[in-house]
Image (tube, rainbow, N blue to C red):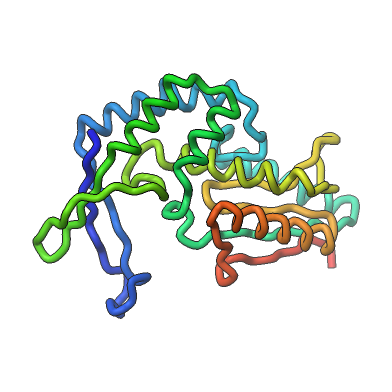
C-alpha cells in the first residue's frame, strides 16, 4: 500500500538536462482500489459539504461549468463595453513542491473528520519510493513535499493546498468582476489559475498578491507560461 516505483521517461532529445525528463509512478492494483474508495466515499464527500471556495472549479464543478462561467462573464462585459482582464497563472513543478503539513492543517481548518485526516497523513508518512533506471531499482526513500506520483488523491490534495494559498491572496484583494453581485476573482483548474480583473491596476494587484502568497508556501510562478489577455470590443 505504501510503496511505489518511479519510472523516468525522456521528453526531448537533449537528455543532458533534468527538466527534459518526466516521471511516472507505478502503484499496485490493491492500492489503487483502496485510494479510490478513500477519494470517492470520503474525501470528495467531505469537501463537498465544507466551505471551499466556489471558484475552485476542480473541486466543486466539472471543467465545462468553468467554461460556461467564463463565457457568461466575457459576454456580459462585452455587452456593456467593459474590459475583462485575464492572467493565466502557471506554477513551476507545482505538484512537486506542495508541503504535506499544509494539507493536514487546511483540512483541519475546514473541520474535516480528524480520523480521516489521520488515515491520509499515515499513507503519506509511510509511503516510500524507489527509482527504476538502467534496469536497476534504487534505494527506497520518503518525501515531505510534493503529492504522490500516480496517487488518485493527488489532484484533490493539491486543490486543498491551492485553496490555502488563494485564501491568503483574497484576504487583501478586492475584485470588481462579479456575477449576480457575487465577486469572481479567479477560476482554477488544478495548478492553473485564471485571474480576473476589471482593469489593469486591479490585475497587477492580483498578480502581486498571488506571487507573494505562493512564495510563502514554496511555490514559484512560471514567467514563461504565465500569460495576460484582455477581452474588449477594440
Residue occupying the far left of the picture: 135
> In which quadrant of the rendered image does the N terminus lie?
top left
Residue occupying the far right of the picture: 80
Residue 233 in the image, given as x and y percentages of width and height: 84, 63
Name the foreground residue: 228 vs 5.
5
Name the foreground residue: 102 vs 173.
102
Q: Residue at x 77, y 63 (%)?
A: 204
Name the foreground residue: 61 vs 168.
168
Residue 129 in the image, given as x and y percentages of width and height: 24, 48
Q: How many marks?
A: 0
Left or right: residue 86 versus residue 64 is: right
Q: Residue at x 79, y 48 (%)?
A: 172
Name the foreground residue: 13 vs 122.
122
Residue 99 in the image, given as x and y percentages of width and height: 47, 47
* Corner quadrant of residue 12: bottom left
Q: Residue at x 60, y 58 (%)?
A: 215
Residue 203 drawn above or below residue 178 = below
Amino acid at each position: 500500500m505504501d510503496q511505489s516505483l518511479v519510472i523516468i521517461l525522456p521528453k526531448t532529445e537533449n537528455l543532458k538536462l533534468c527538466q527534459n525528463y518526466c516521471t511516472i509512478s507505478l502503484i499496485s492494483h490493491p492500492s489503487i482500489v483502496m485510494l479510490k474508495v478513500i477519494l470517492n466515499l470520503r474525501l470528495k464527500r467531505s469537501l463537498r459539504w465544507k466551505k471551499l471556495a466556489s471558484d475552485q472549479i476542480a473541486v466543486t464543478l466539472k471543467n465545462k461549468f468553468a467554461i460556461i462561467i467564463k463565457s457568461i462573464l466575457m459576454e456580459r462585459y462585452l455587452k456593456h463595453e467593459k474590459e475583462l482582464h485575464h492572467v493565466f497563472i502557471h506554477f513551476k513543478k507545482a505538484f512537486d513542491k506542495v508541503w504535506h503539513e499544509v494539507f493536514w492543517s487546511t483540512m483541519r481548518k475546514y473541520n474535516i473528520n480528524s480520523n480521516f485526516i489521520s488515515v491520509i497523513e499515515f499513507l503519506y508518512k509511510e509511503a516510500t519510493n524507489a527509482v527504476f533506471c538502467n534496469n536497476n531499482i534504487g534505494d527506497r526513500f520518503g518525501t515531505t513535499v510534493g503529492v504522490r506520483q500516480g496517487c488518485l488523491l493527488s489532484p484533490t490534495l493539491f486543490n486543498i493546498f491551492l485553496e490555502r494559498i488563494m485564501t491568503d491572496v483574497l484576504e487583501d484583494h478586492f475584485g470588481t468582476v462579479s456575477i449576480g453581485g457575487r465577486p469572481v476573482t479567479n477560476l482554477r483548474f488544478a495548478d492553473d489559475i485564471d485571474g480576473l480583473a476589471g482593469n489593469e491596476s486591479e490585475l497587477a494587484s492580483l498578480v502581486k498578491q498571488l506571487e507573494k502568497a505562493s512564495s510563502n508556501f514554496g511555490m514559484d510562478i512560471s514567467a514563461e507560461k504565465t500569460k495576460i489577455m484582455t477581452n474588449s470590443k477594440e
